[in-house]
Structure formats: structure tokens, C-alpha cells
Amino acid sequence: MSLLWADKTIPQAGLWALLLLSTSVGFVHGALDVVLLPRRFASRTQAAFMFAGYLLSVLLVGWLLGGAVSLALWVLLLMSAWHFGEPYGRWNGFSPLQSGLTRIVVGGASVMLPVLMATEQLAIVLTRVLPALGCQGWQVLAWVWLGLFIVWLVLCGVRRARALRYAWFELLGCVLLYALFSPLMAFALYFGVYHAPVHIWRVWRASANAASTGPPKINTGGAIAAAALTTILTWLLGAGLWWFLAPDAIAAPDGSGALRWLIVAFAALTAPHLVLISLCAAFLSQPDIER
């Protein structure tokens, strides 16, 4: 109730929530990629090289998209629709077409529903952030997503609803969030209270399972230290991106500069994160091992 009250009565509450959750639990969930790298690659040397490539990718994407916020948003929306829909074994036994549709429909809900459910509120937020073309591109993507959702309903969403119960839970949860909260607050809660914490739990669960069945490649203390150092490095990269976007990144009273920074920062950080998580999907999908 307090969040609803804050969202309705405090100006920029949604933006502040998104900033705080993104730079705290959001950055930590991304920093745990440093724990996954040794699991994915055979040697520490390979992992170190891939970590360097990871950072280079963040810098390159941030530099390329820093002057094109609309493009950064479109890229971010497409990556998010794929990344947020990672199945992690929650629905099995479907054809590649059905699985791909489910992933896009579930993953796209959190980033496409605001255009369809809160058009006017979103327009007010984006007026000073994006040119008209950027908003129109988001609307096109949202309508495409809605069309895919209808196809998904026909192919498997209704007929195999029980097998897709986790997909339906997430879809209905997103609808509820955007029905109750403003677009920024709803996404802040989805990302910072659901997606990021669940990912953190999934990484540590998979690492604990792996440690119980064989010698771990990285101990708990080392993993915590590596994640902490990577979080600090992420903050430094974010500060560098803020400086790179100046003067546009300077927080104006309406928060438009901060929101532009968030869009570009999310795009830059999501690109290598998405690739690594896809490579580690099988590792992260392991069920708990009874001890």
C-alpha cells in the first residue's frame, strides 16, 4: 500500500525506484556473471579473456548507442523480450516454435505491456526523453508482440495452460503490476524485486548444486569478492557513461537525463549478459539436489 501511495502522490517516485533498484540489486545481479564465467569456460585464462571481452562489449555498445537513444531503446526492448523469457526448465515438451513463442511472449510482457496498458502515462514520461520516432518504434514492437501473443494463445497458451502455468503466472503478474502502478514503478518492481533477486538466487543455487557434486571452480568467499569488485566496476562504468552522455545525462528536474542514461546503460550491460546467460542456461536450470 505504501508503494501505491508513493507512486500516486510523490513526483518521480517511479523513476527514483527504478534508479535505486537498478544500481543496487540490478547491478549485483549482472555482476554475478563473474561467477558464471569460470563455470562456462574450461580454464581461468579463458574466463579472464572472456571477462575482458565482456567489459569491452559493454564499453563498445555504450559508445555506439550513447548518441542514439531511440536505437538503444529498441535494441534494449528486443534483448529484454528474449532475456526475460529464458525458460530455465519451467516449461518443457514443446516444439521449437512453441518454445520460442512462449519465450518471446513471456519475456516481452514486462516491456511491451506499458505501451498497451498505460499509453498516456508513458507518453508523458517519454516526451522529453525520446523523439517521436523512438516512441513510435516502441508502439510498433508492442503491437507485434500482441500479435505473437494471440498466435501463442491459439497454438499452446490455452490448450496447454497447465504445462505453461509458470508462463501464465508471469504474464498475469505483469498485467497486475501495470494495472496498479505507473509504468516506471511497475517495471522497477518487476526488474528489481522479481527478475534480479530470482536470478541471484538461481546463480547461487546452481553453484551450490555444482559444488555438492564435484570440486568447485571458485569458492564462496572468492565468488563474493569477485561479485563485489565487479559491482564496483559496474558503478564506475555507469559513471563513465553518465559523463560521456553529458550534458544530456545531467539530471533535469523532470528526470529525463537520468532516464536516457538508464536506457543506454541497460542496453550496454544487457548485451553481453544476455549472451552469457544463454550459454549458461542449462547450468542455471538444474533442479535442487537433495543433500
Image: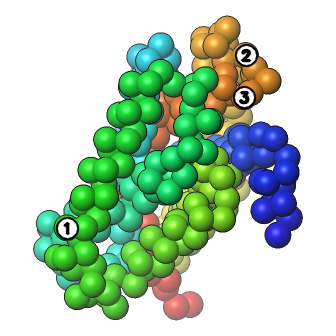
Residue at the disc numbered 2: 250
Q: What's the residue at 79%, 54% (across, down)?
A: 8
Residue 242 at x, y percent in the picture: 66, 19
Gap between marks 3 and 2 measured at Cα? 9 Å
Residue at the disc numbered 3: 255
Give the class, few, some or many, for how many residues have Cα within 10 Å of label 2's Cα (few <14, many ≥20): some
Q: Nearer the viewer, residue 220 or 118?
A: 118
Image: 253 above or below 24: above
Residue 34 at x, y percent in the picture: 54, 45
Gap between marks 1 and 3 measured at Cα? 38 Å
Gap between marks 1 and 2 measured at Cα? 43 Å
Give the class, few, some or many, for how many residues have Cα within 10 Å of label 3's Cα (few <14, many ≥20): some
Question: Mark 3 or mark 2, which has the lower sequence index?
Answer: 2
Disc number placed over residue 151 in the picture, else none = 1
Q: What's the residue at 57%, 27% (across, down)?
A: 127
Of marks 3 and 2, the one in the foreground: 3
Residue 184 visible in image: yes
Q: Assess whether mark 2 and mark 1 are in contact (beta carbons under 8 angstroms).
A: no
Query: Residue 123 falls in which quadrant of the image?
Result: top right
Query: Residue 94 falls in which quadrant of the image?
Result: bottom left
Residue 84 visible in image: no
Q: Nearer the viewer, residue 132 or 261?
A: 132
Question: Mark 1 or mark 3, which has the lower sequence index?
Answer: 1
Image side of residue 272 versus residue 102, left or right: right
Residue 206 at x, y percent in the picture: 50, 69
Question: Mark 1 or mark 2, which has the lower sequence index?
Answer: 1
